[in-house]
Image (cartoon, rainbow, N blue to C red):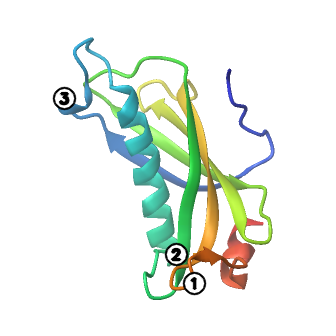
Amino acid sequence: MRFTVPEEKKLTHELVIPIRWGDMDAMGHVNNTVYFRYFEIVRIEWFERIGGQPNPDGEGPVIVNAFCNFIRQLEFPGDILAKHYVTNAGRTSFDTYMTLERTDAPGVVYAEGGAKTVWVDFPKQKSTPLPDWLRTLIV
């Protein structure tokens, strides 16, 4: 089953990530688990850029699910252009989507994925409404 990435989404961040030799598996292509690491790298950098890092004594984002559609094999050497999008802002959550392209093949998507992000009050261990400053950025 292939998960679909919505056409209507807001581009919020781009990042170039080098493919490391150690990212490959025995078959000579990037290991499937590393794609999720690439998604995490671009998502965390976006949260840091906007001031939305988790605060264990306060609030912050939690990923409650994640998916990846593997479209083409990524191989070493090379650089990836990771694009980060947001959509579907609700009261306490929003969706993020990412695409991975090689910088030497612009516009060719090698993988696409996403995650549901829930805003959480960590001391209470429950979801809480998205802060106004974040809602302004993602809507």
Decide if residue 106 is on the left or right side of residue 5. Answer: left
Q: Position of residue 96 (x, y in %)?
A: 63, 52
Q: Is residue 80 above or below residue 130?
A: above
Q: Position of residue 68 (x, y in %)?
A: 55, 33
Q: Position of residue 61 (x, y in %)?
A: 55, 69
Instruction: Write down the residue under mark 2.
Output: 52
The residue positioned 42% from the left and 17% from the top of the image is 73
The residue positioned 35% from the left and 43% from the top of the image is 17
Q: Quadrant of the C terminus?
A: bottom right
Whole-angstrom CA distance, mark 2 to mark 3, is 31 Å
Whole-angstrom CA distance, mark 3 to mark 1, is 42 Å
Label 1 environment density (alpha carbons within 10 Å; few <14, some 14–19, many ≥20): few
Label 3 environment density (alpha carbons within 10 Å; few <14, some 14–19, many ≥20): some
The residue positioned 50% from the left and 78% from the top of the image is 51
Q: Position of residue 53 (x, y in %)?
A: 46, 74
| Residue kind at label 1, given as amino acid type | Lys
Instruction: Write down the residue under mark 3.
Output: 21
Label 2 environment density (alpha carbons within 10 Å; few <14, some 14–19, many ≥20): some
Instruction: Write down the residue under mark 1.
Output: 124
